[in-house]
């Protein structure tokens, strides 16, 4: 749900910028339409959404995922130039958004340098893939699933025995959690390796870090130490 709201809020922020100078240009409308298409945001009533944005008292809409927030900032910068000139109000809005997500001067310069029109919305529209999570001993499961969803991954949660009894998962990434007892973790890992091969990842608390060497010795290729970050989820699909 957070990913969907981030995408919609990107469109709303672009609408704010489109209207802030008092004139809506054709180039801006074209850019907005492209953005909605590439982000997968279906707008049935553009006039209604525009009225909603204009009525809202908030100057900017929050984008929770940091990567998507930076992509939103890039899209605001590009739209501000869409009509051939940057209005001071447009510049102010883009700078305010940059400050709201904690962008400093050096990062601002890098963002301007990195703007790529062809792949501007890639971090929004890319779907990472599917992750099956084994719930056994996964105390912070909801936190893990939220990060996965924010990164565009679809998820399914099952118990260990349920997973082992089901059909082969194919190319799906499978994540399981370490147990308190090292031997239980190793046995669990061995059963899962036989089931799904190389697409297997173990999640551990920092207090379970000593178990990693045993997992690597039996052929596990990837471990994540909690908390999981966006880059951890992205790396799962490069196993």
Image: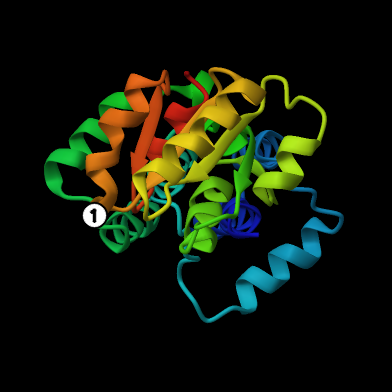
Tell me: 192 left or right of 220: right
Viewer-closest of 234 and 185: 185
Residue at point 40% right, 27% down? Answer: 222
Residue at point 16% right, 50% down? Answer: 104
Q: Which residue is mark 1?
A: 207
**Residue 165 placement: quadrant:** top right
**Residue found at the far right of this picture:** 44
**Above or below 28: residue 200:** above
Q: Position of residue 96 (x, y in %)?
A: 31, 61
Residue at point 24% right, 57% down? Answer: 102
Tell me: 12 left or right of 17: right
Tell me: 62 left or right of 204: right
Residue at point 29% right, 39% down? Answer: 211
Q: Residues within 10 Å of mark 1 (few under 14, many from 20)?
A: few
Tell me: 123 left or right of 225: right
**Above or below 98: residue 38:** above
**Residue found at the far left of this picture:** 106
**SS type, badge 1:** helix
Please say whether residue 160 is visible from this viewpoint. yes
């Amino acid at each position: 749900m957070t990913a969907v709201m981030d995408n919609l809020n990107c469109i709303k922020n672009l609408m704010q910028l489109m209207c802030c100078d008092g004139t809506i240009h054709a180039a801006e409308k074209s850019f907005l339409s492209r953005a909605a298409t590439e982000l997968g945001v279906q707008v049935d009533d553009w006039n209604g959404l525009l009225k909603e944005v204009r009525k809202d008292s908030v100057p900017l809409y929050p984008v929770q995922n940091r990567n998507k927030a930076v992509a939103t900032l890039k899209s605001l910068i590009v739209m501000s130039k869409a009509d051939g000139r940057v209005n001071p109000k447009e510049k102010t809005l883009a700078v305010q958004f940059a400050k709201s997500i904690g962008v400093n001067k050096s990062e601002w310069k890098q963002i301007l340098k990195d703007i790529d029109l062809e792949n501007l919305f890639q971090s929004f529209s890319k779907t990472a893939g599917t992750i099956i999570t084994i719930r056994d001993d996964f105390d912070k499961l909801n936190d893990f699933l939220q990060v996965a969803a924010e990164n565009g991954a679809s998820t399914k949660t099952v118990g260990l025995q349920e997973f082992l009894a089901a059909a082969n998962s194919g190319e799906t990434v499978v994540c399981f959690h370490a147990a308190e007892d090292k031997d239980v973790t190793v046995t669990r890992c061995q059963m899962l390796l036989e089931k799904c091969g190389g697409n297997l990842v173990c999640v551990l608390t920092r207090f379970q870090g000593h178990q990693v060497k045993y997992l690597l010795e039996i052929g596990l290729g990837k471990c994540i130490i909690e908390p999981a970050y966006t880059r951890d989820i992205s790396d799962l699909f490069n196993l």
